[in-house]
Image: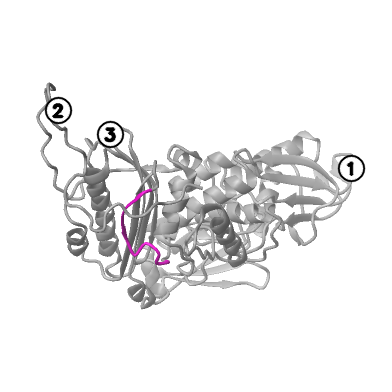
Amino acid sequence: MAAVGTAAVAEAPLTSIRPMPRADAGVVVPPARPTITAPAVDDLVKQANLNGKIGFVVSDAKTGLILEQRNAAVAMPPASVAKSVTALYAFDSLGLDHVFETRLFATGGIKDGKVQGDLILAGGGDPTLDTNALAGMAQKLKALGVTGITGAFQVYAGALPYVKSIDPSQPDHLGYNPAVSGLNLNFNRVHFQWTRSDSGYTVEMDARSDRYRPRVTTASMKVVDRDLPVYTYVSGTTGIDEWTVAKGALGNGGSRWLPVRRPDLYAGEVFQALARVHGVTLPTATVRDAAPTGTAIVSHASQDLSTIVRDMLLYSTNITAEAVGLAATRARGVPVTSLADSGAAMSDWMRASMGASAAAFTDHSGLSDTGVVSTQDMVRMLQTAKPGGVLHQHLKEVAVKDDEGKYNEHAAHSIFAKTGTLNFVSTLAGYVTAADGNVLCFAIFTNDMDRRAALTRAERERPDGGRGWAGRSRWLQQQLINRWMTVYGV
């Protein structure tokens, strides 16, 4: 492992530390470049006007030498920067070529167009399975000559532990906080659409894709004459997600995605509808607890893990991170029944493989603020993963901004990193490359946990002051990187 070295300077310099040419006898020396002044760190921090904690580390990627640091060893919530750890954890545990398989098992043969026994839709933990993929499986089933079954239609989701929501402290209606299981569909979200007419509102709940729009009953919506709260949720006794929405919040029409809490039943209902379109009649899906038996007669393979992770880091999809992280932990032979169990396993891996000392994850997406890691640990990981390595290749490019917060189209450096945002938590970690190819590893964490803790559950979607605080934090991140490129970049 490439250890991170000791700090280069006791006090952060204000000017570039690039060496100047020296005059030797008989040598014509070109004019020295002017000294380039960079703002002091304390001045940038003061200008950002952030309450709470600020921690950062920047190191030379080639030597591991720490160039500047502040609160480097303090454990803080990483927000979605945790997904970069999950990416490496999954690559190490599963391999870049790993695919997730969703299969249809038949407990008996096919006779006279019918499966002689049960048909089982068995998830393999694929976080990217969508309605189009299920339609393709229904089409394959039809191609086998199947028109029905003599037994039960069952769904199996035991490939991964069932988690009702990633972070229970979040509001119920947030689509980025769904359930996780071994059988997932449409990122475990259902599409809610409403239309106003003279007689009131028409609502639809469906599992739409670009080609299909099957309606579902595993999630229901009722418009209620009130102003607040906008949404209420209860889980019905039969696994149905029962929602109400305030009439005063609907306007003339609109739509949004809502989280699904029983993705196994949701996927079963959608597959039943799609099979019917293709001439295959199935009974209502029931849940199967035991691993499927019989013969796999239809299968769907996901894209490879490399592609899945690249999209996860680009779009910061929480369910992808959780499913991939849980699958990685199970592949390592660690028994897990919760996200906290799996987060602890990833923490152990980071300590053993990356030299981390403060890693204590409670999930794989960073959606919960209970998981922590230090900026020092993050930079050690980036150093070990190496610039140009597999993580660097999967990170997204982050636009460079000037001191006014405007995009700098003419910037000489490039940033490939993972961003992270929670209410009053903002993080950034990755690689910054200078014009001459020199690379720095960095991690910047900011948070105001007292202000975050004071929020009610209902305030967590759009808290007062949250947007401005996050904007100032992102400004500070950019200015620190601009400073480092000025002082250490070449």
Find the distance from the CA under tag 3 to the CA under tag 2: 28 Å
Q: Residue at x 74, y 50 (%)?
A: 121
- x and y percent of residue 323 in the render? 60, 54
Q: Of label 2 and label 1, which has the lower sequence position?
A: 2
Question: What kind of residue is marked 1?
Answer: Gly
Q: Of label 1 and label 3, which has the lower sequence position?
A: 1
Q: Are marks 2 and 1 in contact (CB under 8 Å)?
A: no
Find the distance from the CA under tag 1 to the CA under tag 3: 64 Å
The mark found on residue 440 in the picture is: none
Lateral position of residue 336 relative to residue 224, left or right = right
Q: Which residues are magenta?
A: 65-75
Q: Which residue is tagged 3? A: 435
Q: Which residue is tagged 1? A: 109
- x and y percent of residue 469 in the render? 27, 64
The mark found on residue 24 in the picture is: 2
Labels in figure, total: 3
